[in-house]
Amino acid sequence: MRGHIPDMDVISEICKKHQLYLIEDCAHTMGGGWDNQHPGTFGKIGCFSTQTYKHINSGEGGLLVTNDDDVIAQAILYSGSYMFYDTHLSKPAAQVFEQYKKIIPNYSLRMSNLQAAILRPQLRSLDRQVARWNERYAVLEEGLNQITAIRVPPRSTREQFVGSSIQFTLKNLPRDQMARFIDECDQRGIRIKWFGWQEPKGYTSSFESWQYISPMPDLPQTKKVLDGMCDMRIPLTFSTEDCQTIAAIIKEVLNDIRLSL
């Protein structure tokens, strides 16, 4: 999530112990790694998004990777190949399809040739883009870490993260003042997402609004974490000087709020 990669050795061991399939959601981690192994290659399936704001961008769409013939055969059929699956460039042997072709519905989720043509050249520049993101992340991280009211989560030295966004926690700021902080930053041109909104907003929502899970258990520790958690994308259109300015503005907003409390 947001360029963070957890301890994949621990997660892989838990899945092995409990005989669970590990499916990796790598929407924000393409180009990163754990102990120099790419995300999406630890489990049974790796899923990548190529939607706007992802590390390679075709506007919409995505892809999955797997070494499992049964998984890829079902995915090809689900994606809308009809009975033309034998033309797919990543297909397994024809007999693998025999057990699935009459029972798998067609969801028409194909990636177009145009999207693929847009994405493939971006792969060649991915490492360079990751280095540019991480350069900007480092400047923002240094600036935010100098603000006593802010905590930026530490990174493991084993994680090859992608700093395309930065997360930080505001310590001991009441909820109503958190909303004020987000609003005043926005007025000064800094768009920060907050995970503590009561109602879903933009790309963020709290578990308290997820009515598709019922009954929702009481999760006081999770709520405490979300109440102070902020998220901000780091577009490559930002310069390192822009990142220094952003950290300075965030500090200024917090000072204004605390002086008025």
Image (cartoon, rainbow, N blue to C red):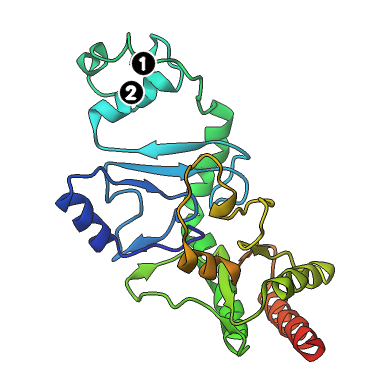
Q: Amino acid at mark 2?
A: Gln
Up-down: is 167 above or below 84? Answer: below
Outermost left residue: 17
The residue closer to the viewer here, 240 or 192, is 192
Give the left or right position of residue 257, taking residue 34 as reference: right
Question: Which residue is drawn at the image coordinates 27% and 15% (left, top)?
Answer: 97
Q: Amino acid at mark 1?
A: Ile
- Residue 62 position, x and y percent, is 50, 38
Q: Which residue is mark 1?
A: 104
* Mark 1 neighbour density, 10 Å: few (under 14) some (14–19) many (20 or more): some
Name the secondary structure under disc 1. loop
Q: Quadrant of residue 84?
A: top left
Outermost right residue: 187
- Residue 243 position, x and y percent, is 67, 76
Up-down: is 203 above or below 241? Answer: above
C-beta proximity under 8 Å, tags 2 and 1: yes
Question: Which residue is drawn at the image coordinates 36% and 63% (left, top)?
Answer: 6
Q: Quadrant of residue 240?
A: bottom right
Q: Which residue is mark 2?
A: 74
